[in-house]
Image: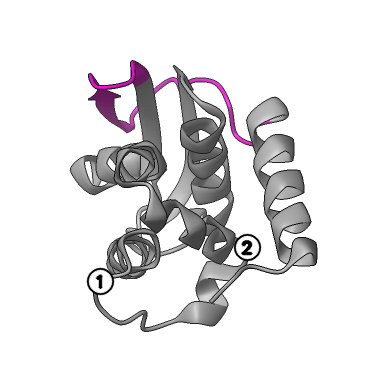
Amino acid sequence: MPISDDLRDLYQQVILDHSRHPRNYGELAGDCAHAHGDNPSCGDEVDLWVRFSPYGSIEDIKFSGQGCAISQASASMMTVKVKGLTKEKAAAMIEDFRHVVTGEGAVRDEDALGELQLLEGVQKFPQRVKCAMLAWRALEQAL
Protein backbone atom coordinates (compact mmCIF):
# COMPACT_ATOMS: atom_id res chain seq x y z
CA MET A 1 0.00 0.00 0.00
CA PRO A 2 1.49 3.36 -0.99
CA ILE A 3 2.38 5.69 1.83
CA SER A 4 0.51 9.00 1.86
CA ASP A 5 2.36 12.29 1.48
CA ASP A 6 1.20 13.36 4.95
CA LEU A 7 2.55 10.18 6.54
CA ARG A 8 5.81 10.50 4.61
CA ASP A 9 6.17 14.10 5.84
CA LEU A 10 5.46 13.04 9.43
CA TYR A 11 8.01 10.21 9.13
CA GLN A 12 10.65 12.63 7.89
CA GLN A 13 9.86 15.20 10.59
CA VAL A 14 10.02 12.66 13.42
CA ILE A 15 13.20 10.97 12.15
CA LEU A 16 14.97 14.27 11.56
CA ASP A 17 13.88 15.69 14.91
CA HIS A 18 15.08 12.66 16.88
CA SER A 19 18.33 12.36 14.91
CA ARG A 20 19.20 16.07 15.17
CA HIS A 21 17.95 16.50 18.76
CA PRO A 22 18.30 13.05 20.34
CA ARG A 23 16.57 12.48 23.64
CA ASN A 24 18.48 10.83 26.50
CA TYR A 25 21.83 11.26 24.74
CA GLY A 26 24.89 10.84 26.94
CA GLU A 27 26.25 8.39 29.48
CA LEU A 28 25.04 7.20 32.85
CA ALA A 29 27.49 6.96 35.72
CA GLY A 30 27.25 4.61 38.64
CA ASP A 31 25.59 1.24 38.90
CA CYS A 32 24.02 0.47 35.53
CA ALA A 33 24.06 -2.05 32.72
CA HIS A 34 26.06 -1.20 29.60
CA ALA A 35 25.82 -2.67 26.12
CA HIS A 36 27.55 -1.85 22.85
CA GLY A 37 26.28 -2.48 19.37
CA ASP A 38 27.71 -1.85 15.94
CA ASN A 39 26.72 -2.38 12.38
CA PRO A 40 29.90 -3.09 10.39
CA SER A 41 28.09 -2.86 7.06
CA CYS A 42 27.41 0.87 7.49
CA GLY A 43 29.56 1.98 10.44
CA ASP A 44 26.75 2.76 12.89
CA GLU A 45 27.67 2.36 16.57
CA VAL A 46 25.71 2.72 19.79
CA ASP A 47 26.52 2.48 23.46
CA LEU A 48 23.62 2.10 25.84
CA TRP A 49 23.46 2.55 29.61
CA VAL A 50 20.46 1.35 31.61
CA ARG A 51 19.80 1.90 35.30
CA PHE A 52 17.21 -0.37 36.84
CA SER A 53 15.11 0.48 39.86
CA PRO A 54 15.09 -1.88 42.86
CA TYR A 55 11.80 -3.17 41.44
CA GLY A 56 13.32 -4.08 38.07
CA SER A 57 11.93 -1.28 35.93
CA ILE A 58 14.05 0.96 33.72
CA GLU A 59 14.71 3.95 35.95
CA ASP A 60 16.98 5.76 33.50
CA ILE A 61 18.46 5.08 30.08
CA LYS A 62 20.95 6.93 27.91
CA PHE A 63 22.76 6.26 24.68
CA SER A 64 25.64 7.64 22.70
CA GLY A 65 26.94 6.77 19.31
CA GLN A 66 27.23 7.74 15.73
CA GLY A 67 25.48 6.67 12.61
CA CYS A 68 22.78 7.39 10.12
CA ALA A 69 19.62 9.32 10.92
CA ILE A 70 17.59 6.11 11.25
CA SER A 71 19.91 4.48 13.80
CA GLN A 72 20.17 7.65 15.89
CA ALA A 73 16.45 8.44 15.71
CA SER A 74 15.49 4.86 16.57
CA ALA A 75 17.80 4.93 19.62
CA SER A 76 16.37 8.26 20.78
CA MET A 77 12.77 7.13 20.29
CA MET A 78 13.49 3.84 22.06
CA THR A 79 14.90 5.54 25.17
CA VAL A 80 11.78 7.67 25.47
CA LYS A 81 9.44 4.70 25.13
CA VAL A 82 11.13 2.20 27.43
CA LYS A 83 11.88 4.48 30.38
CA GLY A 84 9.73 3.29 33.28
CA LEU A 85 8.95 -0.12 31.77
CA THR A 86 9.68 -3.38 33.53
CA LYS A 87 12.27 -5.66 31.94
CA GLU A 88 9.46 -7.91 30.73
CA LYS A 89 7.53 -5.08 29.08
CA ALA A 90 10.72 -3.71 27.53
CA ALA A 91 11.49 -7.17 26.10
CA ALA A 92 7.97 -7.36 24.66
CA MET A 93 8.39 -3.91 23.10
CA ILE A 94 11.68 -5.01 21.52
CA GLU A 95 9.87 -7.94 19.93
CA ASP A 96 7.00 -5.75 18.73
CA PHE A 97 9.41 -3.22 17.24
CA ARG A 98 11.28 -6.04 15.47
CA HIS A 99 7.97 -7.13 13.93
CA VAL A 100 7.28 -3.55 12.79
CA VAL A 101 10.60 -3.04 11.01
CA THR A 102 10.89 -6.53 9.53
CA GLY A 103 7.23 -7.05 8.62
CA GLU A 104 7.46 -10.53 10.14
CA GLY A 105 5.15 -11.56 12.95
CA ALA A 106 2.30 -9.81 14.69
CA VAL A 107 2.62 -6.71 16.83
CA ARG A 108 0.97 -7.30 20.20
CA ASP A 109 0.71 -3.71 21.45
CA GLU A 110 0.57 -1.10 18.69
CA ASP A 111 -0.57 1.60 21.11
CA ALA A 112 2.56 1.21 23.23
CA LEU A 113 4.79 1.67 20.18
CA GLY A 114 3.23 4.99 19.20
CA GLU A 115 5.40 6.94 16.77
CA LEU A 116 7.89 4.07 16.59
CA GLN A 117 5.49 2.59 14.04
CA LEU A 118 6.60 5.34 11.66
CA LEU A 119 9.77 3.29 11.15
CA GLU A 120 7.72 0.56 9.47
CA GLY A 121 8.91 1.83 6.08
CA VAL A 122 12.45 0.53 6.68
CA GLN A 123 11.22 -3.03 6.08
CA LYS A 124 11.49 -2.23 2.35
CA PHE A 125 15.23 -1.67 2.81
CA PRO A 126 16.87 -4.68 4.52
CA GLN A 127 20.11 -2.80 5.26
CA ARG A 128 18.11 -0.11 7.07
CA VAL A 129 16.42 -2.72 9.29
CA LYS A 130 19.84 -3.28 10.87
CA CYS A 131 20.16 0.47 11.46
CA ALA A 132 16.73 0.71 13.08
CA MET A 133 17.35 -2.36 15.26
CA LEU A 134 20.86 -1.46 16.45
CA ALA A 135 19.93 0.22 19.76
CA TRP A 136 17.17 -2.32 20.34
CA ARG A 137 19.65 -5.19 20.08
CA ALA A 138 21.87 -3.38 22.59
CA LEU A 139 18.88 -3.03 24.92
CA GLU A 140 18.27 -6.78 24.61
CA GLN A 141 21.83 -7.37 25.82
CA ALA A 142 21.42 -4.91 28.70
CA LEU A 143 18.22 -6.56 29.92
Residue type, label 2: Glu
> 45 or 12, which is in the foreground?
12
Figure quadrant of residue 137: top left
Color encoding of the figure: one colour
Residue 80 percent coordinates (x, y): 58, 50
**Which residue: 60% across, 34% down?**
24
Residue 21 is left or right of residue 41, and the answer is right
**Which residue: 44% across, 81% down?**
109
Residue 108 percent coordinates (x, y): 36, 84
Q: Which residues are magenta?
A: 22-44
In whole angstroms, how far apart are the C-alphas of marks 1 and 2?
A: 19 Å
Residue 85 percent coordinates (x, y): 44, 63
Instruction: For label 2, count other residues whose C-alpha is less than 10 Å away and answer few (under 14), some (14-19) or many (20+).
Output: some
> 79 or 118, which is in the foreground?
118
Sequence order check, earlier mark of 1 and 2: 1
Visible residue check, residue 84? no
Query: Which residue is label 1 attached to?
Result: 104
